[in-house]
Image (cartoon, grey):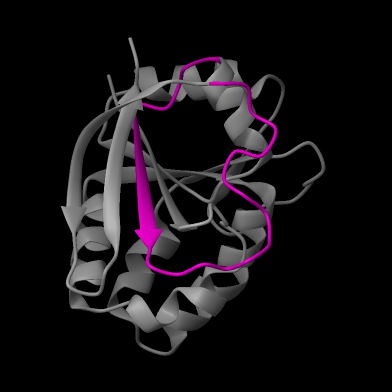
Amino acid sequence: MRKLIESTFVTLDGVIESPEQWGSPYWDEEHAGYGDDLFSSSDALLLGRVTYEAFAQVWPKMEEAGDEDAARMNALPKYVASRTLKDATWNATIIEGDAATEVARLKELPGKNILKYGTGELDRTLLEHKLVDEYHFWMFPVVAGGGQRLFDGIDTTHLTLARSTSFASGIVVLVYEPKR
């Protein structure tokens, strides 16, 4: 069975909104290497509508500009959970109907991991149905002071720390699994 892995950037005060504004000073070779390893272990992406739309505007342009990783990102199959998106043109399939059922079905298919970027409404469903196998929370050494917070509105959920990785930049990636 494939794993569903969530990768999320978060500040020390729990903010996940606008990581391009507070995270970029910390993006270095260690950061890129860890991200590349996660990406290489996957052969599909699961995205919510907001993340999908943001990525679909940026990644094709990056490939045109010669970014080597962009070609793989653009070619990777994407599954988008959305009740409002009607057209997905960036190598994506819109999940219709019950997202939990479809994600569980995708996990049963042969292949590598499914990587999920972004945290939002879809996470409530994934948590409720215990579909995420690993959370990679990239804790950045910054306090944002405001913005959308990680898992706002989610009921108490217990996780188990599987491992952690520290970077010289001060980022610590905390890998959690559902408590069984």
Horizontal and vertical percent position of residue 97 = 72, 22
Horizontal and vertical percent position of residue 98 = 68, 19
In-image side of 102 versus 107 (left or right): right
Is 17 part of what is drawn in magenta? no
Q: Quadrant of the N terminus?
A: top left
| Extreme residue in the top direction | 180
Residue 112 lies, with reference to residue 156, above or below; the image says below
In-image side of 30 versus 144 (left or right): left
Q: Tell me what residue is drawn at x 66 percent, y 60 percent.
A: 53
Choose between 152 and 119: the one closer to the eye: 152
Q: Tell me what residue is drawn at x 74 percent, y 51 percent.
A: 87
Q: Tell me what residue is drawn at x 45 percent, y 85 percent.
A: 64
In-image side of 66 versus 120 (left or right): left
Range drawn in magenta: 129-156
Horizontal and vertical percent position of residue 35 = 27, 60
Q: Tell me what residue is drawn at x 18 percent, y 59 percent.
A: 166
Residue 47 lies, with reference to residue 129, above or below; the image says below
